[in-house]
Image (spheres, rainbow, N blue to C red):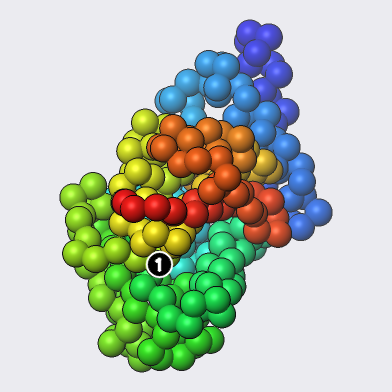
Amino acid sequence: MTAIESQLVQPIEFLQKIVSKGGPEPHEYDQLTQIADRLGREHKAGNISAIDLKLMQQGFGDECLSATLHGHSIRKPYGYAGDFMIIDKIYREYITPDGRFEKWDRFWQNCAATRAVRNRKAYFVKTIANCLERKGRLDLLNVASGPARDLADLYVRIGRGRVSTVSIEADGRAITYAKGLNSGFGEEIDFVEKNVFRYEPKDVFDVVWSAGLFDYFNDRVFVKMLRKFVSWTKPGGEVIIGNFGTYNPTRAFMELFGDWYLHHRSASQLTSLAVQAGVEKQNIRIENEPEGVNLFLHVRVSGIQ
């Protein structure tokens, strides 16, 4: 056994112990997070191979992975990380009905990252409601809308006739699901099944919102798409981009045991990318939700586009 392998025995044994009893208890959450951090560092250093990582993921067992949220993330039944169903399960604080594995879902739903996703929905509703107070009515573009539960919550709060939404989503299954959630507000929302890279709007919007898309982009694509979003926004309007920040205490667990990788960016990095996209600094501000995990880049659009 090498020195590195010897150092990994204790964290792996702890993980195996937690798996064997169906998941962690609340008093073990911090230790599990620390173990994931340590294993994450070793993986990035090349001390845990891709094969060994796969074996660790499979060590949860087929039944556990079939029942739990982190198993959903690993297996990607809709073909991609962060699909509409797992996002909506996070919004609803879903816990598997299989009592053998519910501890894993309780841990997952307690993670800072999942709390931040729920806060993201609340931030959206509050932000759009505040915009309405200033403008009276809005044309909204919601890009990569997923389950669109945020829209459903918004319309319950504000009622009909005040926000006209175009909702862009590449996954037709997500649109079908979203239409069901928003069945009472069908006249307010135009769902468009389209890859955002091939989308060209007929009109411009007061607000262009996208909270769960840009942290999948590298910097080059981020800048390219932000330029497009600015061009789709009315003068005096606003582009709002959500992105996971560099503070994410459960990042390693998401990555190692959820196979869910994102581009985490600091406030200064988001500002720099917006400047590269041609936005003047005085038109940029960065906000965050209460966990401090999700950041929001606000770009005020001025002048003739």
The kind of residue tagged 1 is Asp
Q: Which one is nearer the viewer's eye here, 69 or 11?
A: 69
At x 29%, y 63%, the residue is 204
Question: Residue 266 appears at what percent x and percent y?
Answer: 61, 37
Q: In this view, does 19 lie above or below 191?
A: above
Instruction: Residue 290: name its quadrant.
Output: bottom right
Q: Residue furthest toward the right? A: 27
Q: Circle 1: is it few (<14), some (14-19), or many (20+) Cα within 10 Å?
A: many
Question: Residue 112 appears at what percent x and percent y?
Answer: 66, 53
Question: Residue 76 appears at what percent x and percent y?
Answer: 36, 51
Q: Which one is nearer the viewer's eye here, 262 or 253?
A: 262
At x 72%, y 28%, the residue is 10
Q: Residue furthest toward the top? A: 2
- Residue, disc 1: 206
Instruction: Residue 155: name its quadrant.
Output: bottom left
> In the rendered view, does 234 fall on the left or right side of 56?
left
